[in-house]
Amino acid sequence: MKISVNWLKEYIPVTHTVEEMANKISLTGIESSPVHNDEGLDKLVVGHITSIKKHPDSDHLNVTTVYIGEDEDIQIVCGAPNVADGQYVIVALHGAHLPEGKRIKRGKIRGQESNGMICGLDEIGVPVKYVPEAYHNGIYVFPEVVEPGSDALSVLGLSDGMIDMDITPNRADTLGMRGAAWEVGATYNEKPTFKTPKIDDSKVKENTDLTIEVENKELVPDFMTRVLKDVKVTESPLWMQRRLWNQNIQPVNSVVDAANYTMIEYGQPIQAYDLDKLENNSITVTNAHSGDKFVVDDGTSKVLNNNDLIVKSGDKILGLAGVAGGIEARVTTETKNIVLESAVFDGTSVRKAAQRHDLRGDASNRFEKGVDNGAVSDSLIRASQLIDENTTVGEISQEIVGSYTKANPTIIKGKVSHINHLMGIELSSDEIVSILDRLGFDTELNGDDLVVTVPTRRWDMSIEADVVEEVIRIYGYENLKGTLPKGMETAGGYSAKREFSNKLRNVLLGQGMDEVINFALMNKKEAADFNVINTNYTKLLHPMTEDHEVLRTSLIPGLIKNVAYNQARNNNDISIFEQARIFDRENGVDRPKEIEYIAGAISGNIFMDSWNTSAKKVDFYDVKAIVEELLSFTNIDASFDFVATNKISNLHPGQTAEIIADGQSIGFIGKLHPDYQKEQSIDDTFVFELNVDTLFGMEKRNVQAQSAPKYPSVSRDLAILVDKDIESGTLVKDIFENGGKYLSEVNIFDVYQGKNIKSNHKSLGYHLVFLNSEATLTDDQVEKAFDIIKDSLVQKFNVEIR
């Protein structure tokens, strides 16, 4: 909400700069910043065109003579299609500065001298969408006589200092100039004064032209109208237009502008309809039927459903209640009789409709946050008054009430001692009462008891804590003295679970992987692609888009999208991970469990070309090594097995393994299925995912430091021929089980299949290391253990010792 300082001066004395005021208001809790619309602009004056003739060497240019308040008129060449003799216009003189660094210079245009430029509003910084439509493709013409030579920026209101208040949802009372005046006035201990809106009583007639019916009064607690007849719809006066475009509202005509002006002044949206376009002179507020079509006043069409609250007349839909007006009864310059509507609509209903149809605007913003139901009638009177003052009106009807709810002030009871206790300071009763009086609240003090009567314009207040907040922010947060906390102190630090998670994260960072953060929401197909835990989907009731309607069941889909995004931009070597929560919802339960996982995706080269190395594509065993390294840092007292599986449909059936820890599944690792990779438009990619919560809950082993061995180790190499379907991990496990207490390492160093090897067999080579930390091993000890290993492999797996 932009607060005009000149407008504010009509309510309270203003002696401070906009910078000082913005800073002061920010200190009371509403973040504000100064706005200078004329920044960087100069040498712009009002000119009066005294003559015009065609350019001798151009079909579209005109040579004008313009009086700018000096002894001699100046000549300006102008190409605007709407330039005409007698107009009062904006003139940029020689040396003038315009937005975006433009500067006007004297010169010749096709041989004719031009001493400046006649400007449109958009050329001096007003966005095109806020310029009156009549001047979109030409210069701006003042609607009234203005003194030539006067400062154009002042006349247009662009030199008016503005304060941009970033209104929080609970302070919608400041979405009107009157509410803002109370806020600024309380800050500077100045009570605002307002004029009561009045209508010419001689024009007020009893209504005989309009009937109102409100079907759902719970959603429409207030709905009031007035009929204005014999209205001459014209252009609004300049003072009103400039206040509207300074509020980012496009001036339209004297009726629509009066409605919008009232909204800015009171914070109460006003809607206007053409009475002669209504069916049977009736208005009904009701719910739409699913499939009804509504054409917005900008020409766009919307398909409604039965949750949409509408204003209609017969079969015509006049507007989406509280959201947007329609084209059916729009007020134009041809309109003779109008209906003004002032209402209160249910905020939730308005918010959902505005979001559903992508029609959020100034009116819906106010209704969804709340409006003052005590100002509904006054704002209707004010809009009628403005139209009557700015144009011709024959008669005005009495107020026509469709629904009405009495506006009652809020009564809050408290104690001065308790208020001081909650604030942590000691203010006297008089100081507290004075602050509340500055806010326009009535108070009744009886000893320590305090009764505060809050006017309807502050519907955000309901309990004693709200009174405390008002007192302390007007008193000034900057005036609070710093104090040390009392009581027991709590030592800082991470929880054991957080420490564990951080350790896993640091391991992957140490492996050269990059961390990513993805949305927890995805579409249903993505959630189904890797629903390995086979959980129920948790769907949002009102998703913003179809791509963000389901809570994720795995981190893998998000990582795949990251890979696709990077590879589409020729960044093909990807090594990323994410540590976050997935959502597991059991049958019959609405709220899902949040389970922490860590997952990674690697694609492209794992080693780059260098002077002493060659590029190497990532493979299954590279990723398996990363996972094994990660698991080694968990310090879990368990044996980890990688068991081949084909249960995950979007992973390669020959390069996928389930990770088992002492019989319990903790995750998986594998290569994406070629068909899935093609569908996602990515190259070969390997992924892994681990359940962090499960890992954290497992038994940990005690780790003790050991001195370096004093005695030498003994190694043996073992070469075997084995069926190709037997996994190396199974063989290694058996070797350890039979190798005795001195077997410390088993590493595979050779794998071969092909020529000179039995069909359906493979040759494996293992390097075994034996070590006794307390004595030197003898050959007999090693050979005995080695023989037991070989015998076991032959008996269990039918291997051939080579």
Image: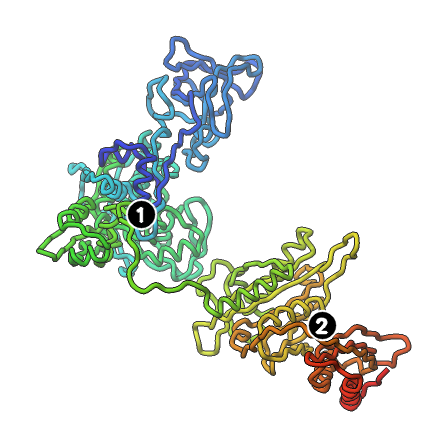
Identify the residue at image location x=33%, y=32%. Answer: 236
Q: Dot 1 lies on which element?
A: loop
Q: Nearer the viewer, residue 721 or 133?
A: 721
Q: Residue 430: x percent and y percent?
A: 13, 48
Measured from the top left, where is residue 70 in percent x and y?
Answer: 38, 11
Give the residue at the far top of this rendering: 71
Q: Which tag, 1 or 2, sits closer to the chain's start?
A: 1
Nearest the viewer among 361 and 536 is 536
Say which amino acid is labelled 2: Gln
Asked whether the residues under the numbered discs 1 and 2 touch, taking CB atoms below 8 Å apart as contact, a structural biologist would say no
Q: Give the quadrant of residue 729.
A: bottom right
Picture residue at 84% right of the left edge, 75% below the top: 753
Residue found at the far right of this picture: 756
Q: Nearer the viewer, residue 686 or 523?
A: 686
Amino acid type, mark 1: Gly
Left or right: residue 608 versus residue 258 is right
Look at the image and tell me in which quarter the N terminus lies: top left
| Residue annotated with mark 1 | 29
Which residue is at the far bottom? Answer: 795
On the rendered structure, is 319 left or right of 393? right
Relative vertical location of residue 511 with respect to residue 700 in this rendering, above or below? above
Residue 148 at x, y = what percent? 36, 17
- In what element is the residue under mark 2? strand
Is residue 248 left or right of 421 when viewed as pictured?
right
Q: Return the residue at label 2.
A: 655
Snapshot quadrant of residue 154: top left
